[in-house]
Image (cartoon, helix red, strand yellow):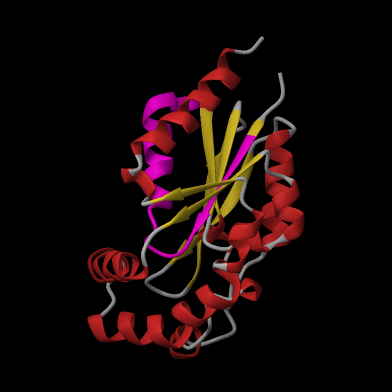
Amino acid sequence: MGVLTIGIAGGTGSGKTTITKRIMERFGDDVSVINHDNYYKAHNEMTYEERSQLNYDHPDAFDTDLMIRDLQMLKCGEEVHSPVYDFTTHNRSQETKLIRPAKVIIVEGILILADPQLCQEMDIRVFVDTDADVRILRRIVRDVNKRGRTLESVVDQYLTTVKPMHEAFVEPSKKNAHIIIPEGGRNQVALDMLMERIKAQLSAE
């Protein structure tokens, strides 16, 4: 039986992580997740102030080639040690994350559908489509509470890079999706259909 690879994309705060968590809660160790966020390029040569000015919402901010190689290794049944990104320092940490091969691999990230080669590695490509006002509110809560950002810095980043890059790269990548899920994890019908597809994969001989 082959490996089923599912890409879950969508704008910041769209509900990608909620869907991924629901799938993991349901299927446990039969599912592994590889996150595009952990593949931001390292910038040890820069100061914190310089790193904080970078555009983290452009495809060039990611080492997508490394992610593709790691994903291919997982699909071949090999363990990988992915980078770990520290959002409080705007840089890669010294840690790595062990990702084990599984029957189902979820690829998660805002820009995963914007890369043609990465798209080819996915059997099912999902785009989570959520209204912009909901997404920005979720991002504010997340970045302030979990990433130590100020409200002013979150709003400034949203207006200067997040919103323009969403319009330039994330939204157009929706055309590469097989499935579009409005309202993310709150769309129980779409989530149930995705769960059934994974269940069928796991029960196949």
Q: Looking at the image, which residue is at 43% across and 51% down?
A: 16
Is 2 positioned to the left or the right of 101 in the image?
A: right
State the count of labels.
0
133 lies left or right of 9: left
Vertical side of 42 occupied by 84: above or below: above
Compare residues 171 and 28 and report the one nearer the observer.
171
Q: Is residue 26 above or below residue 163?
A: above
**Magenta region, residue range:** 5-29
Quadrant location, the N terminus = top right
Please state which of residues 57 and 169 is positioned toward the viewer in this rendering.
Answer: 169
Is 102 placed above or below 45 here? above
Q: Is residue 107 left or right of residue 191?
A: right
Where is residue 24 drawn, in percent x and y?
42, 33
User: Within the magenta stretch, is there residue 26?
Assistant: yes
The residue located at (61%, 51%) in the rendering is 177
Looking at the picture, how far across and down is residue 69, in whole percent?
74, 50
Give the vertical position of 66 relative to 48 (above or below): above
Residue 86 lies, in percent from the top left, at 43, 66
Across and down, in percent, residue 9 comes to: 53, 54
Q: Quadrant of the C terminus?
A: top right
Question: Which residue is at a point 41% across and 30% down the rendered structure image?
Answer: 192
